[in-house]
Image (cartoon, helix red, strand yellow):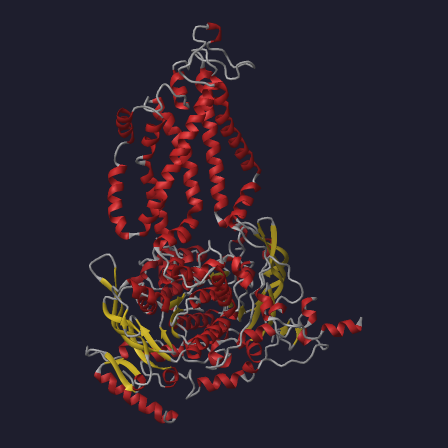
Amino acid sequence: MSNNANDREVIVSVKHVDISFDTGGKKKFKAVSDANFDIYKGETFALVGESGSGKTTLGRAIMRINPCSAGEITFEGKRISGKISKEEDRNVVRSIQMIFQDPAASLNERATIEYCVSEGLLNFHLYKDENDRIAKVDKALQDVGLLPEHKSRYPHEFSGGQRQRVGIARAMVMEPKFIVADEPISALDVSIRAQVLNLMNKLKAEKNLTYLFIAHDLSVVRFIADRIAVIHLGEIVEIAESETLFEYPLHPYTTALLSTVPMPDPLIEKNRKHKVYDPSVLDQSGAPREMKEVRPGHFVHCTPKEYDEYCAKADRLEKEKGVR
Amino acid sequence: MSENRKIVLSARDIEVQFRVRDHYLTAIRNISLDLYEGETFAIVGESGSGKSVFTKTFTGMLESNGKISNGSVMFHGKDLTKLKTDKDWEGIRGAKISTIFQDPMTSLNPIRTIGSQITEVVEKHQGVSKAEAKKQAIEMMERVGIKDAANRFDEYPFQYSGGMRQRIVIAIALSCHPEILICDEPTTALDVTIQAQILQLIRDLQKELGFTTLYITHDLGVVANVADRVGVMYGGQIIEYGNVEEIFFDPRHPYTWALLSSLPQLGVKGQDLYYIAGTPPSLYNKIQGDAFAPRNEHALKIDFKQEPPFFKVSDTHYAKTWLLDPRAPKLEKPEVIRDLHEKIKKMTDKGGAFHVE
Amino acid sequence: MDMENTNLFEFAEYDELESEHIAAPRYSYWKSVWRTFFKNKITVGVAVLLLCIIIFALIQPMMSGYSPIKTPNINNSHLKFLKPSPEHIFGTDHVGNEVFDAVWAGARNSIIISFICTAINMLIGIPIGALWGFSKKMDRWMIEVYNVISNVPFLLLAMILSYVLGAGMRSLIITMTCTEWIFVAYFIRTQVMIIRDREYNLASKCLGTGTWTMIMKNILPYLISVIMTYVSREVPSLISYEVFLSYMGLGLGTTNASLGQSIAMYTSYMNGYPHLFWIPVSVLAIISISLYIVGQRLADAADPRTHM
């Protein structure tokens, strides 16, 4: 797909995926259309969009919670969407884990932390004996900065940040290869967010993980992601390396999203332009749109006419900022 | 600045307690605050800091198990803490002091048309005829940016998007010409691209109508966008307040430092973000000394023993930390937030990551 | 003094993990349930009363040896229709038997039957209902089964079964369980559907948790409170079913004592000797109401929102 595809191993590949939902009537609601991208091993790939953009739906399709209505998703080269064998199912469940948005809703309130963290171990019998299981739970809790004494506690006794870390420990104990993190910090208090982001980075490095990081906030994504896909109303509009996207944003929606990131500086923020995305600036000729590579590794969703415009814009930005 | 401006509302030594089971929890611990006419004051704090509870004392909307156990709120020569019944509050709550909440649906009636909900408020507060009220309601809808207001007058809330609904809530809140508008996380439930528009709308209307705005938010970006003055809340107290530039560029309380430092906007990829360990204090435990001390890596021994008083930084800027005591060791704010303005300027100027052309 | 003061302005030691400790005492679900339950004095009083009634109802008939077909005093007119007095606490009936004995023997059978039926209905209804709520495939045909069964008139079924199986405890239990379980299952199904798609269940699914573990660990623990509410209504309502069927002659038959039997038997003497009728009815009412109150309070206590 891109120039570095040769030397980088693809772990998850989303191939022309559509996801539709029944709305009761004859019409189907298309939440995601023609999503097409690869996630490389060891990177943090971010999916950024507003609510209703389909970003969570797509994340859940990779988790195999939502079925794809077209296209397929592969993991380590094997198809995981649709029906797969029981054995493969077990393998995929272990290898792909999820971190949920709301730590208050995603933990079983009637189970102890020990059970919450052991759940996956128990399902797959990933331990030698009881002592080994306890040791694994203790280790997982310590890895996320919690204490072994927390095992006998219940989720409601913890603060939001601690609960989210339990959620992370529960996923990590499975020794997964790939993690879908669906807005993992947006439900947390501001003072807690940084800790969870650091933790995710630390674990990624230690355990050689790959993340799909779903978010609505570009400032968070800039800090954590290697590559970013911007999604708007079910369509991915731009994919690029993180630095590239911030320095050379091409699609008007990306620019609008960039302008909404609040800056912690009253002198600047009060005079900052907040762009509103106006789809009428796009090519209205009705020509079909597809993902096109404007620069190596930098894709934009465009018609042929727009493609030329984006190329020109990239040229201009490069000239202004010095060649990349 | 403060001397010659008119104070519209003055809260003194407010203490609020909640009865939960057989315990009394103190949610607000002695807050004093003056609001000046026409200004925008922002209260920043995390959930549980008491920011919403505090402002609810201005409208008498505390939950039934809560009570103001001490202090006074003076507004137009009346002590609002003495008001009890809904009748006492008539003419103040929803009239002179209006509130916009996070979720617009909490303020809208789902089974009545948008138009009738605005008209009702106009009729009640301005005593005009039905036809006149409708005319004003449509005007108000246009003013808050509803296109084609006359046609959308008879639609129901579910036919409006989240951002539109919040505009309607603003229209309702403003159609009784309040003197104070309390905005309780008005944009948290909205999409990022809508947020800025709503903030801009409130600011424009404030310029036009001259009311005083009190923001409650956890988002320092919103604060930077809207505020003239800022109060930082932690553990049921305001721990630092001052003009917005003072709070962002010369913060003095370690908690304010920590809040600013941990913003992902300031993060450098590949390095750890600054973070605050631990969790906000639980109201179940009695707080001794400085509430932030257990999470504060710069805590002094005295912080655990004795509550600090407010130290004056400038005529407008005060902070409640022992670090400002002459006996305390000198300590500079963390590296990340030094020269904040220069750093942000670099990010937003041409070539920066957040430059908008 | 000054020395001390300057020392106070030194930096304190800072341990990050210190702030992770939870100060609150350990929480235990069942301990909290019992604590909440026993906190209310009236509830405890009613529970003690209920316990006494149940124990007494189980023991007293063994000592009296009462049976409606034993009528040793039938020819002794001095012992018939006596008003309640210290010697004859509830008085005597038309055949000279102690009403006291009759009522307790009846209460015993009624309580035993309602408890057994409730247990059977719950044991069948809860697992089936849980699976029913969980599986969309099963829901499609189960709902049809439910529609059919719930439309069979209960009285008709009771009559047919009593003809086929004859009167007696066994057939009464079958009558009161053979269709009743599906109502329990339907109730559980609805409750399960409410919480089935919550995010923590999705999380369990992502961890590879199977349906049955999910039901046992994720779903049923959340339903303890509503199940208890259901039971607290089911037991008294089955007692009144029993009374009703026995009154109609479809219940235990004339050879066994039961509250329904007694009430049916004594109704005809209501004008002359009203105590004969009102005493068993009152005992029935006291048992039902106290069962209901205790059950409700237990259900409340089982709701973690009441634990503080």
In the displayed structure, would residue B289 be above or below residue B273? Answer: above
Res C155 seen here:
yes
User: On the rendered structure, is C85 left or right of B131?
Assistant: right
Q: Residue furthest right?
A: C1
Q: Which quarter of the figure is the N terminus of chain C placed in?
A: bottom right
At 59% from the left and 66% from the top, the residue drawn is C19
A189 or C79: nearer the eye?
Answer: C79
For the question of whether residue A187 can be seen, the reply is no
| In-image side of B34 versus A293 (left or right) | right
Q: Quadrant of residue B305?
A: bottom right
Residue at 41% over, 23% down: C258
Depth order, front residue of A235/B355: A235
Identify which residue, C119 or C1, lies in the foreground: C119
Q: Position of residue A228 (x, y in %)?
A: 36, 78
B209 or C252: nearer the viewer: C252
Residue C127: x and y in percent read 35, 45
The relative height of residue A109 versus residue C127 in the rendered view (above or below) is below
Residue pushed farthest front?
A: A128
Q: Position of residue B33 (x, y in %)?
A: 60, 66
Residue B319 placement, left or right of C46: right
Q: Quadrant of residue C177?
A: top left
- The number of discs equals 0
Give the x, y percent position of residue A101. 42, 65
